[in-house]
Image: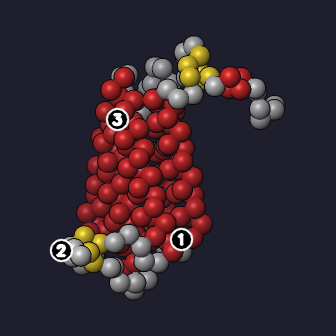
Amino acid sequence: MAIYTKFGDKGVTTLLGSNEIPKNHPRIEAYGTIDELNSTIGVVIAFSDIDSVTNSLRKIQKDLFVIGAELASKTPKNRLGLVRISEIEEEIDVLEAKLPPLKHFILPGGSKTASLLHHTRTVCRRAERAVVAASVKEKINPHLIMYLNRGGDLLFMLARYVNYKKKVDEILWKGR
């Protein structure tokens, strides 16, 4: 099977179960950004040396394939639900309990892995905005937006946790 089909050479593609649509369609933009998010998580995993962080990120990668499939289908099966979102909330709560309380904004950065997690968080927020934009035009599972919102929070907490474990101080932002 060839990797190229030449079908998209005219700037069109198809959703599962639909006719041709332009490649700049909001749904295509949404699942393309989900794919980018998944790839950035792969980069973080390549630098991660904390097993619990790596395991958490692998779960997110699997979830993102489900989200991408939902967005790529005209008639999605809505396989991502509140149970998984609750699991992410529990993980955030566990991480937060291990970390010093946050009393100021922090500048993104720190160790290499934490810095990559902060960058990945911003890609997650962009993916969230893309899914919201698609939901304005089409029926989208609202759990996807909730998942990405919590996912961004989890990535932030993972960045903080990595810096904490590596004993890298967070840089507080207290204004100018």
Secondary structure of the residue carrying numbered label 3? helix
- Where is residue 40? Give x, y as percent: 54, 56
Given this view, does label 2 or label 1 mark the residue nearer the observer? Answer: 2
Give the structural element (helix, strand or loop) at label 1.
Answer: loop
Q: What residue sits right under mark 1 in the picture?
A: 48
**Considering only vertical position in the picture, is 124 above or below 173?**
above
Q: Which amino acid type is shown beneath numbered disc 2?
A: Lys
How many tags in the picture? Answer: 3
Residue in the image at 34% along x and 35% along y: 132
In front of the other: 91 or 167:
167
Residue 78 placement: quadrant: top left
Give the Cα separation between the discs numbered 3 and 1.
30 Å
Label 2 crowd (10 A; few <14 / some 14-19 / many >=20): few
Q: Earlier in the sequence, mark 2 or mark 3?
A: 2
Decide: few, some or many residues near mark 3? Use Cα within 10 Å; few <14, some 14-19, many ≥20.
Answer: some
SS class, disc 2 = loop
* For residue 51, side relative to residue 92 (left or right): right
Residue 14: horizontal and vertical position, in percent?
A: 59, 21
Q: Position of residue 150 (x, y in %)?
A: 31, 51
Residue beneath disc 2: 103
Label 2, label 3: how far apart the Cα atoms are: 30 Å
* In this rendering, the label closer to the viewer, 3 or 1: 3
Question: Splitting the image into 4 quarters, where does residue 79 fall?
Answer: top left
Residue 129 in sight from this viewpoint: yes
Q: What distance separates the C-alpha of mark 2 from that of mark 1?
A: 27 Å
The answer to whether 175 appears left or right of 140 in the picture is left
Marking on residue 132? 3
Q: Answer with mark 3 or mark 1, whichever residue precedes in sequence.
A: 1
Q: Nearer the viewer, residue 102 or 81?
A: 102
**Is residue 81 visible to the viewer in this orientation of the structure?**
no
